Image (cartoon, rainbow, N blue to C red):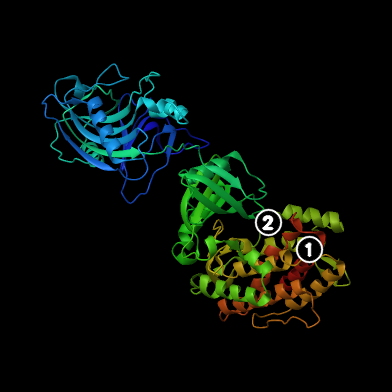
Amino acid sequence: MGWGAPGQQTGHSTIPMGDFLSLGPVAAWLSPESHDTVDYLIIDKKQASIPVTASFLIAQPGSHHFLVSLQSRDSGGITFSDLLDSLKEIAQRSEPGYKRILSLSFCAESPALHVLDQVKLPECAAGSGDVVVVGCAIVLDSSCRSGHWNDVIQQTLVHEKSSPDVNLPRIIGLVFPATSRDGSKIPSERVSRELLSGTPGVLRHLSADTIIRNATILLAIITDIRQNTGTEIVLEGKVRGWNPDYEHIVQSVHHECGEVHLHPISGGFSGSLVFRDDAYDRQGRREMPFVLKLDRWENISAEIEGYEGHVKRYIQNNATQIIETCRSGDYGGILYTFVGIQGLQGRISSLEEYYLTHSTEEVQEVFDTLFRKVLRTWYGQPRLRDLPLYRIYAGVFNYDAVKEWARSRYGISPDEEYLTLPYGMGRSYKPLYFMDRVLPGRLSSNWNVYEGSVHGDLNMKNVLMDEEKNMWLIDFAMTGHSHILKDIAKLECVLKFEMIPIQSEDMLVSLAALEQRFLKPSIFGDIPKIPEDITDPDVKKAFSVILQLRKYADTITLLDEDIRQYYLALLYYTLCVPGYVSVNEYMKEFAWISSSLLCNALK
């Protein structure tokens, strides 16, 4: 009970708060705009909880200690005050840790209702007829006025009209006319049935002078008080782009937690943030492991749609499960949990972290699991369709930045068809000319190729693992039906342009020559080999996994041998690299050379 309302405040809406009461699955509140009409919810018992916005809320966790049944010997009944004195005696005899604080819920019949802060009695109690009152109370002895609980008591645990010497009990109840024949004794059952029957009820603060004739009381003896000071957020590491909306989202999806530790897993170029989310309840107990994704709302809503349409149905056991979503202003968040998580304390890392810290053979084993088990359902049922591949791969990310880089680096524009590649690599097709002059004329051309469900952004940050090598996918904003080679091409480009640290011109020249070898095949079945003179461990590791990806591409395209479709997908993910701010000039130049070689194969 307290001052609040069901629901969470967001950056673009507020909830009018008022007197609030919840009993079991029932939540009732009287907002300032209600004109004395009670709003209520009756929650399905399968629903664990609902969020509540409150300036203060008194909650009694756990179950009650006693079930007390009262039948007054006097036909006139007894006062609530006398009843509370008797309950205090029961508590003193029964519980050594009794701190002179009681919490109770009750269902009572009253022939004389007295209210504290309402001049007008409810119509159902204005006459001489009995009423039914169902509600909650917190009861304190005056000795509780001192000590470390004093501020809490003054603010919440006693009624605001209490004096320094007298603790008026905070009693709040729903009042109904005693006309129904409902025999329910348990408070939450009685109030549920009264509300569902359409019986008009009012919410009132009761005086201890209220007369009770008979009642059923669920009594809890309080031995400690814990204040809810909100959910503390601890950022474990440097986080770019954190804002007040993100903070509100975290607190909303963890509204019942005392503390949340966020460990950055990855941060996307678009501003998205992904965290391993370690949450602790208000008793300090660790909850199940989560992953939290924060981004602009349009991206979060697209991810929810992709999850519902292509993930939940097909790869449920290897995708994180969406359990909470929230929006605040222009931003949103998704809280994921996992199926079958194992390993020490639910340790979660990305495939990228695994790649950087394990051997080539171990990485190849994990990639094999990813494509042959995790993604098997997606790739196992491809459909041959006429797809406009040039249109699908036309919108290169951050293309204006790529053109500016080419202009400042080489002084070239899209107007000329050919260029001379550096390091004696000869004459080659200009990527800008291909994109601006050639590709637009091919947008309506269809390719008879395989279509399937694809992730759309399958980089190694979007594959999460536990210590037992169980894997889950995240980030489904671009998930949908598309060209079946899209994800494999994306991963090849990640390996070439993000996993190989190019720190010298000699290394760049060596990589460019290796790339020429890998872009020569005209059919999928012609899979190149890594030359024996390649000794750099980062290069060997990346291209060993790329060979593995080429074999997957050959497998899922079945009898389709036209590798140009794969080169087109590679161009889409390669040409954008010179526009990145996260890679050095050697890596940008490598991507530029690779793009030109791909255009040679597609011209």
Instruction: Estimate how packed mark 2 is, as few (under 14), some (14 to 19) or many (20 or more) residues with alpha carbons within 10 Å.
Output: some
On the picture, is 575 further left or further right than 460? right
Q: Which quadrant of the view contains residue 430?
A: bottom right
Q: Are marks 1 and 2 in contact (CB under 8 Å)?
A: no
Please report whichever mark, 1 or 2, sits nearer to the chain's N-terminal start: 2
List x then y, in percent, for residue 79.
Answer: 21, 24
Query: Residue type at mark 1?
Result: Met
Q: Nearer the viewer, residue 539 or 2?
A: 2
Disc assigned to residue 163: none
Looking at the picture, how far across and down is residue 175, in whole percent?
24, 29
Please name the residue that numbered disc 2 is placed on: 397
- Whether residue 69 sits left or right of residue 271 in the image: it is left
Hey, which quadrant is residue 388 in on the image?
Answer: bottom right
Q: Nearer the viewer, residue 493 or 51?
A: 51
Q: Residue at x 33, y 26 (%)?
A: 169
Q: Nearer the viewer, mark 1 or mark 2?
A: 1
Q: Position of residue 104 (x, y in %)?
A: 29, 36
What residue occupies the far top of the structure in this picture? 119
* Residue 226 showing in the rendered view: yes
For the point 62% across and 70% down, the residue is 488
In the figure, is residue 258 to the left or right of 234? left
Type of amino acid at the residue the image marks with label 2: Phe
Tell which of 591 and 163 is nearer to you.
163
Q: Which label number is shown at residue 587?
A: 1
Q: CA distance from mark 1 to mark 2?
A: 17 Å
> Considering the image in quadrants, where does the C terminus appear?
bottom right
- Residue 427 seen anywhere in this rendered image of the structure: no
Q: Secondary structure at mark 2?
A: loop
